Amino acid sequence: MSTEESATPATLFGCLLGDSRGQAVLFVPKQSYMSTMKNLVDNGYEMCVDLTAVDFLTHASRTLPDSIAPERFEIVVNLLSLSKRERLRVRVQVSESDPLIESLFDLYPGTEAMEREVFDMFGISFSGHPDLTRILMPEDWQGHPLRKDYAQGRIPVQFKGAAS
Amino acid sequence: MTPRESDTIISAAAGTNEGNQELRSRSELTAKEVMREVGAVLRMSEADAALLAEVEADPGEDQTMIINMGPQHPSTHGVLRLMLELKGETVLRCKPIIGYLHTGMEKTGESLTFMQGGTNVTRMDYLSPLNSELVFSMATEKLLGIDGDIPERAVWIRMLLSELNRMSSHLLFMATNGMDIGAVSMMLYGWREREIVLRFFQKVTGLRMNHNFIRPGGVAADLPADWRDDVMSILDMLPDRLGEYDVLMTNQPIWRERLQGVGVITQAEAIALGATGPILRSTGLAWDLRRDMPYLHYDELEFDVIVGRYGDAFDRYAIRLNEIRESMRIVRQILDRVPRGDYRIQDKKVTPPPRARIDESMEALIHHFKIFTEGFKVPEGEVYVAIESPRGEVGCYIASDGSPTPYRMHVRAPSFVNVQALPHMMRGGLVADAVAVISSVDPVLGEVDR
Amino acid sequence: MGIVRNVLDDGLEGLDHNFLTGRIEDLVNWSRSRSSWGATFGLACCAIEMMGTGAPHYDLARFGMEVFRASPRQADIMIVAGRVSQKMAPVLRQVYDQMMEPKWVISMGVCASSGGMFNNYAIVQGVDQVVPVDVYAPGCPPTPETLIHAIETLHQLIEDGEIMRRRAKSGAGANVHIQEVPAGITTPVILGSR
């Protein structure tokens, strides 16, 4: 574990380590995703608590550290170290033109269902996943519901709802 | 008979066949694929897993049967569909197919304000709705930066309700677990106790379920004046009843035969699968977020973390039974600790004013209007907060873009991850134990599918 | 009723005949309404309240409905308790089709009645899109009292016989005719709109 403080930003395994409301966030480039996750597993982050994604289509101007190039999708992995009682969040930028990233199944088998959900809801594929099929929507559903260009699917009702 | 114009039309193209989501027959898979899942979880190399595949006698296609259990089934705890591959009575493989209760709550959450978000998340884990609201409120408060300013009374009220919710959820577990194993009268007893807790909730929050009571900034209303008496009556009544359950179930031979050694999971498997809560504690690891990563004021209270040893269904039952006792102990301590004060933060931008003020002050009226229609703006950022729900670690990840509605709201549901442990628990067991295993995992399909 | 007056006046000695006559239709309707069995179709939060209604405090057994049959072949009333998702709708229809006539449906809760608070791509906006509903019980979730009121309303409708008369007259029974929809329409959502 190498950290450099003071003037230079903190890094962990060569990736930028940031802070979000007091929580540690690691910005990992896609090409070093697997190797960084492997390092994290070996360094005490035994459990992957959550793997999800965010579609920044309508909020492309989000705040990111300068060295990170924003893409449309972001994979967010929350890790938990039971031995150190610490959490770490990993954020990986995934582009719209190449929505493909490696699967964490071999490191954390618990991500099987989580990655299927991300595939179902966002359309991001995970290479090396044993069974990448839809999990929440019917098998023949078209579209990925949690993307920002997929409408909520409201039907018009007779009263004016509070939400626009 | 000719169809009338007013007849309902449904798409006949959609059947109940879910294609690739279902369990594929053995002939379609190689031994490597079959064992891959097992190998990954057991942390074996692929070579070892392949060896295991050969050792496990590969039954011919005609000796196994794939049967479907659910989604409409009396014992699957909701709309969980399981495809089991059986050889005789033994379960070889199991695949849970979920999504039958997918409600698009995360998408809906993006169009509801942070004040309304509680109504959405509360319906995810409908057995412990206050815990879901609590984690959402805590995540919102962290984004707002007010998580250190929540008044003491509000914090203690939150803890009181959270623990009572844990008790009512575990009582429901006792009821459904009993009924699934065959002690049908347990269903009646468990509900009898749960009703009394629900009555207290109705008195405090106005609703028996799905309360929308814990909101960002505190709680929605103050406790009624005689709440201590009501809580004391619950605490006085329960210990004897729990003793009755011990007599009815814990030491009973049939109960033990049906649950001991059934649905065994090892600690390494549980951690690899991300299982938390009673499942992880039944394997011997004493991990409880209330004690290991305390939130609210749990670090000021004394309580034990119940741990099992064998990782089987009996351990999980015993853990939950004793967690009811521990929750009662915590509630007893909370009874003396709730201070006077505000029940929600007095920040005008977040908390609506008291109703009486609206008649007096124009500013109060405007704040009320803005908070309830447009909502309060939350600064940009992203945060993940997790608490211990009766089922495990429930977490809320919110990414905000500075607007009054969350940009992305994701709830890490413990049951979603725990359901992945089902195939590993059922493998090699009897089909009659399948029901016992599902019941011991205690999934709530609302949060599995969201 | 004369028999009741006789018993009230003279006790059991007042019964001077031990025959009870009535129209077959009345007797059948009376027995159907008093011993209807529900099909378990608990989906979400409303299922918990439904279980609570069967529990000791509210006790559906006094209305003859304590037995919830898992097999639709043995059930009369299907209480759709909870939100019906896109994946679940064909299953709902299949279970409904497997029930024997006469059958009735109570739509419990706002999600089953109209889609409830979830007006989105994932939830069928009212189970009456899929099965014909006889009684709608509002609430989120309906308290056990509301559910009992809905069940009793249905029992009254069964006992009065009105439902059966209407079905017999239209000739359609309890069924809903399905028109074949050309395959390929699986997304009801218009992209780009709110």
Image: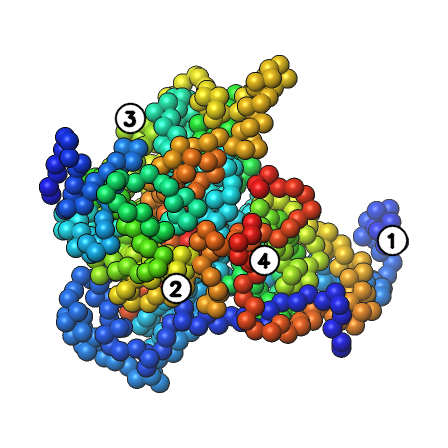
Regarding mark 1 in the picture, which secondary structure is present there?
loop
Rate crowding at label 2 as few (under 14), some (14 to 19) or many (20 or more) other CA atoms within 10 Å.
many
Where does label 3 land, which residue? B300
- State whether residue A16 appears in this view: yes
Which image quadrant for residue C161? Answer: bottom right
Q: Nearer the viewer, mark 2 or mark 4?
A: 4
- Asked if marks 2 and 4 fall on the same chain, the answer is no
Where does label 4 land, which residue? C124
Residues at marks 2 and 1 touching, judged by CB atoms closer than 8 Å:
no
On screen, residue A142 above or below B236: below
Regarding mark 4 in the picture, which secondary structure is present there?
loop
In this rendered view, identify the residue nearer to me: B216 or B402: B402
Q: Residue at x 80, y 52 (%)?
A: C12
Direction from residue B164 to residue A66 in the image, left or right: left
Q: Sequence order check: which comes first, mark 3 or mark 2?
A: 2
In this rendered view, identify the residue nearer to me: C47 or B317: C47
- CA gap between label 1 and label 3 equals 69 Å
Residue C27 x %, y %: 79, 64
Q: Residue at x 33, y 80 (%)?
A: B28
Residue B185 x %, y %: 48, 52
Badge 4 sits on which subunit? C
Regarding mark 2 in the picture, which secondary structure is present there?
strand
Image quadrant occupied by the N terminus of chain B: bottom right
Residue B62 x %, y %: 35, 85
- CA gap between label 2 and label 1 equals 58 Å
Residue type at mark 1 is Met
Query: Residue C1 has which mark?
Result: 1
Q: Nearer the viewer, mark 3 or mark 2?
A: 2
